[in-house]
Amino acid sequence: MPERHVAYVALGANLGDPAAQIEKAMAELARLAATRLLARSGLYASKPAGYADQPDYVNAVAKLATTLTPSDLLARLLDIERRHGRERAFRNAPRTLDLDILLYDDLGVDEPGLRIPHPRMHERAFVLLPLAEIAPDLDLPGHGSIAAALTCVAGDSVHRLAPRG
Ligand code: ROI
């Protein structure tokens, strides 16, 4: 049996119907080969960080059990992004779907195109709030508890969306 790993993945979208894109992507994560969806957050509406002149985002976080390696998991996430019509126009451009590996066990990866832990996760409320919903006791390597990281981004505008009925 290949070894099973726990990975957290951030989802973000701000074009088309962002909430529908995120829900569809969650379903695709749940169907990935060699992977199980262990937990998922609700949907969070957030103001764009980094480049302000673009629509608001919908963000969420998924917790996966997987036997894929980090680079194989990344390749599968890029496949899903492509199927959602993602175009990489420019850095911080609006997107139909963005999938980022946040954590993979307690592994550190620093390769072109793949850095784990995600280098900016601790400063983004749109990542920390959904992550805290499904993993409130998690420690962020090098940055302490999620609760501590959240106190530093308390000003960011992020709120949980009511479930769609
Ligand atoms: N801002 C928000 N609120 N949510 C995102 O997912 C997101 N993703 C990005 C940038 C452009 C940095 N800003 C974002 O890549």
Image (cartoon, grey):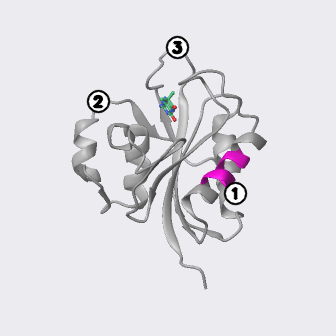
Q: Residues within 10 Å of mark 1 (few under 14, many from 20)?
A: few
Region rendered in magenta? 74-80
Q: Which residue is mark 1?
A: 27
Residue 103 at x, y = what percent? 44, 56
Residue 86 at x, y = what percent? 71, 34
Residue 109 at x, y = what percent? 44, 53
- The secondary element bearing badge 3 is classed as loop
The image shows residue 47, relative to residue 129, as above or below, that is above
- Mark found first going from the N terminus, 3 or 1: 1
Q: Is residue 150 left or right of residue 66?
A: left
Q: Which label was assigned to residue 155?
A: 2
The quarter of the rendered structure image containing the N terminus is bottom right
Q: CA distance from mark 1 to mark 2?
A: 31 Å
Q: CA distance from mark 3 to mark 1?
A: 30 Å
Residue type marked 1: Ala
Q: Residue furthest bottom?
A: 1
The image shows residue 137, relative to residue 84, as above or below, that is below
The residue sitting at 40% across, 51% down in the picture is 117
| Residue 53 visible at all | yes
Q: Which residue is mark 3?
A: 53
Residue type marked 2: Gly
Residue 77 covered by magenta stretch: yes
Q: Is residue 99 left or right of residue 159?
A: right
